[in-house]
Image (tube, rainbow, N blue to C red):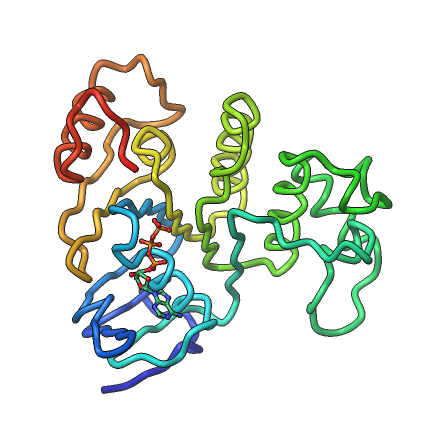
Amino acid sequence: MATDVHRPVTGHAVHVEGLTRSFDGRAVIDDLRLDIAPGEFVALLGRSGCGKSTLLRILAGLDRDIKGTALVPRRRAVAFQAPRLMPWKKVWRNVLLGLPGRPGRAVAERALDEVGLGHRIGAWPKTLSGGEAQRASLARALVREPDLLLLDEPFGALDALTRIKAQQLVGELWQRRGCAVLLVTHDVEEAVLLADRVLVMDGGRIAHEQRIDLGRPREITDPRFAGLRAGLLERLGVGTSAEAA
Ligand SMILES: Nc1ncnc2c1ncn2[C@@H]1O[C@H](COP(=O)(O)OP(=O)(O)OP(=O)(O)O)[C@@H](O)[C@H]1O
């Protein structure tokens, strides 16, 4: 089967078919199928170790040892739970790291302004708070003008308040930019708050999908919210009184 992680977008931002990834003879991803539409926001839930990060790394082009088809746009960007900033480069140089050509400081400044971090453009990474570092990491993704933004638990290490602000920021960026987003998260509320569609991964495949027809902006207090959250927790095999982990 075709293995191509570099094809331009045609009707999909992501097209995955018959995808299998094994480690030591064990298929962590097993004949997986997934389509994401251009501009769609998809959240991916699943028990720890079910293969979410493995799938994201494949879509990011960081893991090519696969069988099957994985088609993604050339313009894609990824942000991880750890912001992964180079400590010896100032924030703006981190934002431009790896970009082709020789983009100037103004390019970094625009992206940093967009995430509310313009005032820290000349700072060293070690002087940033956790939330600021995560925003710098988002700016680094945005300068790539992605058609597909891959987010691997980007808010996982943030305190509750910073996390809420970061979630709002990602929601705004997505609406403004119109790129497709695949967000890996452990947080069912976050998934329901942000996504058009929530997927549950199990047994190496997408075992369940839930469309979120709540309109925007969304409120956790919306009575339909609790029902969607409870249904997804059940799919994750977690009682409704506990959070997915
Ligand atoms: N490079 C590797 N070598 C061997 N096994 C690996 C490798 N990468 C991942 N795995 C295994 O693949 C499985 C899926 O890992 P993955 O990190 O994709 O899970 P996950 O769903 O993202 O987990 P979590 O929610 O805890 O982050 C795990 O059993 C893991 O040990």
- Give coordinates of residue 22: x percent, y percent: 26, 75
Classify the position of the C terminus by image quarter: top left
- Please say if 42 is above or below 100: above
Numbered circles on residues, count: 0
Question: Which residue is rendered at x = 14% and y = 52% of the image?
Answer: 207
- Give coordinates of residue 203: x percent, y percent: 15, 58
Classify the position of the N terminus by image quarter: bottom left
Residue closest to the eye, 158 or 61:
158
- Give coordinates of residue 190: x percent, y percent: 37, 32
Q: Is residue 19 left or right of residue 107?
A: left
- Please say if 208 is above or below 218: below
Residue closest to the eye, 241 or 66:
241
Residue closest to the eye, 137 or 148:
137
Question: Which residue is rendered at x = 47% and y = 38% of the image?
Answer: 156
Question: Which residue is rendered at x = 37% and y = 42% of the image?
Answer: 185
- Give coordinates of residue 59: x percent, y percent: 40, 66
Q: Is residue 76 left or right of residue 117?
A: left
Q: Which quarter of the frame holds ligand 1?
A: bottom left
Q: Is residue 49 left or right of residue 140?
A: left
Which residue occupies the extreme front position in the image? Answer: 24
For residue 212, which quarter of the picture?
Answer: top left
Q: Is residue 59 left or right of residue 83?
A: left
Which residue occupies the extreme bottom position in the image? Answer: 1
- Please say if 157 is above or below 142: above
Residue closest to the eye, 192 or 30:
30
Which residue occupies the extreme right position in the image? Answer: 122
Question: Which residue is rendered at x = 25% and y = 46% of the image?
Answer: 47
